Amino acid sequence: MKSISIKSPATIANLVCGFDILGLALAEPYDLMHLEIRDEPGLQIIHEDEHQLPTEPEKNVAGAALLALMEEMPVKKGFLLRVNKMIKPGSGLGSSAASAAGAVYAANQLLGNIYSNDDLIRFAMFGEKLASGVKHADNITPCLLGGVTLIRSILPLDVVRLDAPEIHISVVHPQIEVRTSDARQILKTEVSLKQAIRQWGNIAGLVAGLMKGDHQLISRSLEDVIIEPARSILIPGFDEVKKRSLEAGALGGGISGSGPSIFMLSEKRSTAERVTKEMEAVFHRMGIDNKTYVTQLNHQGISLNENEHAIL
Amino acid sequence: MKSISIKSPATIANLVCGFDILGLALAEPYDLMHLEIRDEPGLQIIHEDEHQLPTEPEKNVAGAALLALMEEMPVKKGFLLRVNKMIKPGSGLGSSAASAAGAVYAANQLLGNIYSNDDLIRFAMFGEKLASGVKHADNITPCLLGGVTLIRSILPLDVVRLDAPEIHISVVHPQIEVRTSDARQILKTEVSLKQAIRQWGNIAGLVAGLMKGDHQLISRSLEDVIIEPARSILIPGFDEVKKRSLEAGALGGGISGSGPSIFMLSEKRSTAERVTKEMEAVFHRMGIDNKTYVTQLNHQGISLNENEHAIL
């Protein structure tokens, strides 16, 4: 195989109470990537989208991840990467993770699957480091593995894929900027033991609810008493979106990553559609441009793009 | 049915990283209880053990729980309770919960199962309040439901039974006193966000490991970075017991409840036997009397005592 064409999905990190540990993959949106392996060494990147991202490999998120992989590669080969980025950078939907994980996943396929998932996560984290200054795997892991994923520990890396039932997901991306550094700084470095205990009850409930396929337990556990109260003030309209979404039947939800996107989980597609309309209405009334998605849990993660020539 | 004879098992609360939320039931030891329903109102309690516990219903843990149930009982009846307590009070093995939960479970059987598990937990918490001043359900819940249980929330009460694989358990009860009030006071009221995140990664890992039946994931998740470092200093020999148990092949473990008992989980019975010998050796060398158990996860919780006349 000389080339491969893939879809690399958007992801939601910081799954409500599961700050820094739980994430999930979305069926949509996704980036389209085409990777070609070549005998001449070196890496060339072409962006076929309008995001004006740098294409020098060292300054490109997918490039940084691929370079990390290429450094360990047993054979000296080169790559040509073409990207059509559909996940908007800065949306809080794992745009940089999709680039980084997609690139190394595709390379591994072309190399005959010589690297483990843990290796791929390790390479892709170089892309995240370039994007945000921090080597985190919150979005890379669900992007690669699909479904709902747990990062039990980052050092040493210990990731677990969790079984989960069908879940429909509403997402709204209001066109405002929340800087990851602001979102980090607004968090207190200490939390009360009482709140920590409440949070870990919810985390245990959420994991159990997902694995049992118990939507009501999932709903009761979708509560974050530590991060959301601090971060939600950076997103105008957050409280109203949440209130109206729950009234419309959502199981619960919160901030996607460090924002500004907000997501809500629902048991049924029709509920997720109603919820998305409520989200849209809140930002429309505030005069904030926004983009919404009605999508669902992506159980597979990165997948082959069967229809590459039509799209990329 | 006019009378019933039951076994009410010992339990382990504060399951390592799952402080205040995760507990499990042991196959042994257990209390033996015989409850008789009578037309004449009132409650009489007879202890057939050597623990010199008060038998006035208001001052007796099982009595306080039964009185709470009797207050809501639709018919006016009385009870005679006979108890042979095998779980030593103050051991950290849920002795008071076994009394309280056993009594209300038995009464509910005699009344034709008119109360839900949530009701029984609510009644039994009056016993815990008498014993420790706090209405907690950490031991009552696994005692009643069996297996491994999660208390997602205490107010409102939300308990979840978790699937778990076969697990063998070593327990040592050193004959020293750890007062619950000391164990509470030694905890800091604030924890760092960083440690809280590490703890909730472990909790999520432990729940996932139990539900998947993945003993290695259970083992990696049996880490408590918040409570154990503080409380373990109240138990002489704790660090050595833990070190030698892990060397002998235990998956992990920690303080049972608020101590002084220490427990270790193992995948195999033979490992649990080796671990128990190590535990015994540590306290023997220190000259501290101790009692050990090699037992296993009790998937059923409270059960009927088929052989009542021989034992009670």
Image (cartoon, coloured by chain):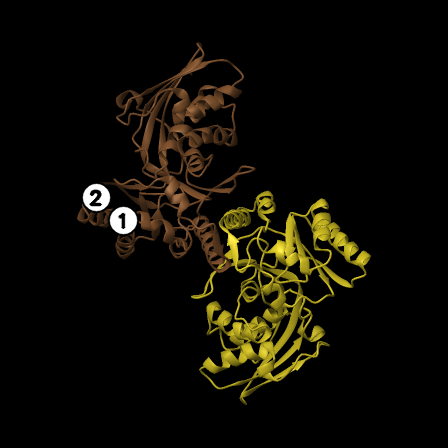
Chain colours: A brown, B yellow
Residue B3 visible in image: no
Q: Quadrant of residue B302?
A: bottom right
User: Label 2 near label 1: C-beta < 8 Å?
Assistant: yes
Query: On the image, numbered disc 1 is attached to which residue?
Result: A236
Which numbered tag is attached to residue A288? 2
Specify few, some or many for label 2: CA neighbours under 10 Å numbering under 14, 14-19, or 20 or more.
Answer: some
Residue A168's x, y, as percent?
32, 45
Q: Amino acid at mark 1?
A: Pro
Q: Quadrant of the N terminus of chain A?
A: top left
When the figure is inspected, residue A240 is found, relative to residue A171, above or below; the finding is below
In the image, is B112 to the left or to the right of B239?
A: left
Task: Identify the subunit bearing mark 1.
Answer: A
* Badge count: 2
Q: Amino acid at mark 2?
A: Ile
In the image, is A44 to the left or to the right of A136?
A: left
In the image, is B200 to the left or to the right of A280?
A: right
Which mark sits nearer the N-terminus, 1 or 2?
A: 1
Of the pair B174 and B167, the residue shown nearer to us: B174
